Amino acid sequence: MEPQDNDFHGKLLSYEEAPSFLENARSEGKKIAHCHGTFDLIHPGHVYHLEEAKSLGDILVVTLTGEKYVNKGPGRPYFNDHLRVKALAALECVDYVVVIPFPAAVEAIECVRPDIYCKGKEYENTANDPTGNILDDVHTVEKLGGKVEYIGTVVFSSTKLLNRHFDAQRSTVKNFCERLSRKFPPDRIKKEVERFQELSVLVIGDIIFDRYSQVVVQGLTSKNKTISARHLDSETQPGGSLAVYRHLKEFTPNVKLIGLVGAEPWVDGRLGDYLDSDSDRVIRNEAFTTVIKHRFVEIEGHDKEVGKLFSVNFLDDYPPDNTAQEEVLKNIGEEIENADVTIVMDFGHGLMQGVHRRFVEENARMMVLNCQTNSFNHGFNIINRQYRRADVVTVDTAELCLARSERHFDARGGLAELVEFLGAQYGFFTQGDSPTLGAWNDQIVDCPAFESVVTDTVGAGDAFCSLAALATANGLPVEVATFLGQVAGAQAVKIVGNRECIDKGAFVKAATTLLNY
């Protein structure tokens, strides 16, 4: 039975009902043509494309990526699901529209099972797909007995139209990206990101496991007025240097990690989920407590920031024993000369002691430093007291305040002084939703935050550092390194903790979308 919806001319099919509905049409001998995309702004190119697709079949089904799953970066989609469905359903050539609750097209193809799957002619060259998903699409279509047709006589870019003529981004973001695109257009940025795979990277730092327990606050207890909550779910995620390792592995296969954990039985399985055997330089020490940061949170829904109630940390209040320290130093010595860039993620939880800091400073070809301040080490893990040299440094507001022993200061001057003290080539000062500063020689650039809707800030700075490190290791200009770091940070703040690593395909798609002018 054909579904009825007066608002959409009876053309809207739900994702759940579409397979059986279309199977009935197929059993009646109907040939199904299929187009999939974001369809954020319907333009003449879309109309020509859809009319040509309809000419190849009896029924044209258009699937569009649900707004929660669009990976074109901040500000996209510009139009919500309802408006995009409305625009498509109004076209005479479109028979049915289905919203797909997944980021890629494979599930859409499996839902429709088309006889003809239509893509634009530009996708005949698979290199034009920044996500790399087109090969999966073709394989899925052919596996289901369909055929891929590359069509299109008039081509426009929705992204370019939106970037130029709509307020898809705040004016500060738009101005920065438009200026950068003149020197680094999307194709060049994509090529530069692909060059990251040539880098050999060593990550040294504290391994942390972030444990999230989701609860619903019921209120206060009647006797002593403490918070009462009902437990819903718990998950343990890779954090600290292990999270940075995962981000980097998306962009280059040549990553090794040196870290320290305890001998708790559960740790083996967790490490096995994330590490390659030939990259495993993680030291197990019975006298050391594996660092766990256990956060109790409320998660109210999509596009709402995770509400953090309180945290319980499992960690030692003393340095690792001599055996562990010597093994860490030995592993660093065996790996550091093979790395193009060494990234130090010093969370102040014991891995990096004075002997390790001096050794890395003296032996790293290129040293990227992130020396973090947190509730455990506040006032002790101060960057310009712990370190004397770095080629690249990233700091946040609290870390720069402590380095200067001042609460209020000129951020540009403070960053420039820290860069000079460490003899760094690049310096980055991240400020949450305020612009990030990137310093190189006497040049300082301001790059605005790209994402204004935040789910969780945990791990965003580590994501920034990961991509900025790769960019600086390849000698990219400071404005490009800052931009790529901000793109990673924008993706990270949409993820709860480090549940997922930065996805290279989505990263490239977002970066090229922001620069498409």
Image (cartoon, grey):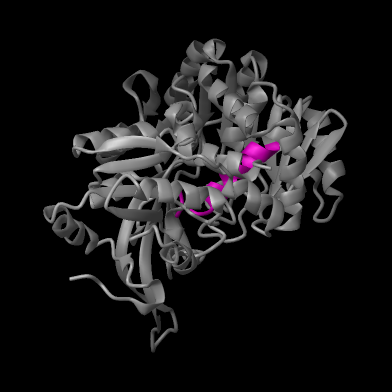
Q: Position of residue 185 (x, y in %)?
A: 67, 33
Residue lying at 47% horizontally and 20% vertically, measured from the top left: 326
- From this view, report whether residue 30 is shown above or below residue 290: below
Name the residue at 35% across, 36% down: 149
Left or right: 410 with respect to 357?
A: right
- Count the marks: 0
Tell me if residue 7 comes above or below residue 492 in the rendering: below
User: Could you tell me which quadrant the N terminus lies in?
Assistant: bottom left
Q: Is residue 456 above or below residue 199?
A: below
**Left or right: where does residue 297 sit relative to residue 204?**
left
| Rendered location of residue 135, percent (x, y) | 35, 31
Position in image of residue 75 (x %, y %):
59, 56
Q: Tell me if I can see residue 464 in this picture.
A: yes
- Main secondary structure along the magenta-highlighted residues: helix
Farthest residue in the bottom direction?
222
The answer to whether one can see residue 427 in this image is: no
Pick the residue in front: 119 or 352: 119
Residue 494 counted in the magenta span: yes
Residue at (54, 37) in percent of width and height: 508
Report the front residue among 500 and 135. Answer: 135
Residue nearer the viewer, 341 or 187? 187
Question: Where residue 39 sits: x, y (%)?
Answer: 48, 54
Magenta range is 482-498
Residue 47 highlighted magenta (yes or no) = no
Residue occupying image coordinates x 67% and y 58%: 166
Quarter of the rendering occupied by the C terminus = top right
Residue 278 position by quadrant: top left
The residue lying furthest to the front in this view is 55
